[in-house]
Image: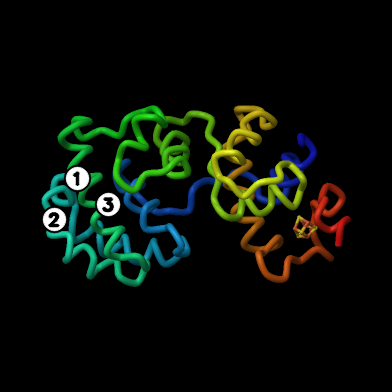
């Protein structure tokens, strides 16, 4: 495990979340938009969205159909718009305008699952987090770290094997690695730095 961590560190260095935001609640919104949508596209849309709604209160009191119109290019716009407005309302009313600092409280917010809760834990509270997105799940299985597609099970397995101080960076690096080397279609196994650690390529 430590060797895998080191190889990815050497390849990508210091790395953080690619979703652009300046306020904590904006990260929650950007993460909701990123479901089944690429970060690059989310960053284009949030630039406009955060200009139109510059405060938490402006989101909490927004007309959700207007939010939906702006976020349409991200897909699932109806559900995402409802979640964003409802989550901002709950943040204001129940949490005093501040994101809570535990996974259990964070997942009370509409549209916030364990992946986003872990991301918030890492980016906002600088706590060790295991952010299980599609890349993390796919590559963890290929490397033989787990044998499941269930995000909460993958999270549990990775939490057990990753040194806490490495877990957030490891997950961020896996995302980058999943985009440019171990892609879902046509992984570049011939030039992969992790080939010696890969169960999947041995079984092929
Ligand atoms: S060898 Fe291929 S499948 Fe295995 S981690 Fe590398 S790119 Fe992915």
Q: Residues within 10 Å of mark 2 (few under 14, many from 20)?
A: some
Q: Position of residue 186 (x, y in %)?
A: 72, 71
115 sits left or right of 81 in the view: right
Q: Residue at x 69, y 52 (%)?
A: 139
Q: Residue at x 54, y 39 (%)?
A: 152
| Disc 1/disc 3 C-alpha distance (Å) | 14 Å
| Disc 2/disc 1 C-alpha distance (Å) | 10 Å
116 relative to 50, above or below:
above
Q: Residue at x 39, y 29 (%)?
A: 104
Quarter of the image where one finds residue 90: top left
Quarter of the image where one finds residue 66: bottom left
Q: Quadrant of the C terminus?
A: bottom right
Q: Residues within 10 Å of mark 1 (few under 14, many from 20)?
A: many
Quarter of the image where one finds residue 171: top right
Mark 2 near mark 1, Cβ–Cβ under 8 Å? no
102 sits left or right of 200 in the view: left
Q: Position of residue 9 (x, y in %)?
A: 69, 43
147 sits left or right of 70 in the view: right
Q: Quadrant of the N terminus?
A: top right
Q: Which mark is residue 62?
A: 2
74 relative to 196, above or below:
below
Residue on which the image places disc 1 = 56
Mark 1 near mark 3, Cβ–Cβ under 8 Å? no
Residue on which the image places disc 3 = 83
């Amino acid at each position: 495990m430590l060797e895998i961590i080191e190889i990815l560190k050497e390849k990508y260095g210091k790395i953080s979340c690619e979703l652009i935001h300046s306020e904590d609640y904006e990260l929650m919104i950007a993460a909701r938009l990123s479901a089944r949508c690429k970060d690059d596209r989310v960053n284009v849309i949030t630039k406009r969205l955060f200009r139109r709604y510059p405060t938490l209160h402006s989101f909490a009191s927004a007309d959700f159909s207007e939010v939906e119109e702006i976020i349409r290019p991200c897909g699932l716009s109806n559900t995402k718009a409802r979640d964003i407005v409802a989550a901002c309302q709950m943040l204001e009313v129940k949490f005093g305008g501040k994101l809570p600092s535990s996974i259990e409280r964070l997942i009370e917010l509409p549209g916030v699952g364990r992946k986003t809760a872990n991301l918030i834990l890492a980016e906002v509270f600088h706590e060790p987090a295991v952010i299980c997105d599609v890349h993390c799940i796919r590559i963890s299985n290929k490397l033989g770290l787990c044998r499941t597609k269930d995000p909460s099970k993958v999270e549990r397995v990775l939490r057990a094997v990753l040194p806490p101080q490495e877990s957030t960076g490891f997950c961020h690096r896996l995302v980058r690695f999943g985009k440019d080397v171990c892609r879902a279609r046509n992984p570049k196994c011939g030039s992969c730095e992790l080939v010696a650690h890969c169960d999947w390529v041995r079984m092929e």
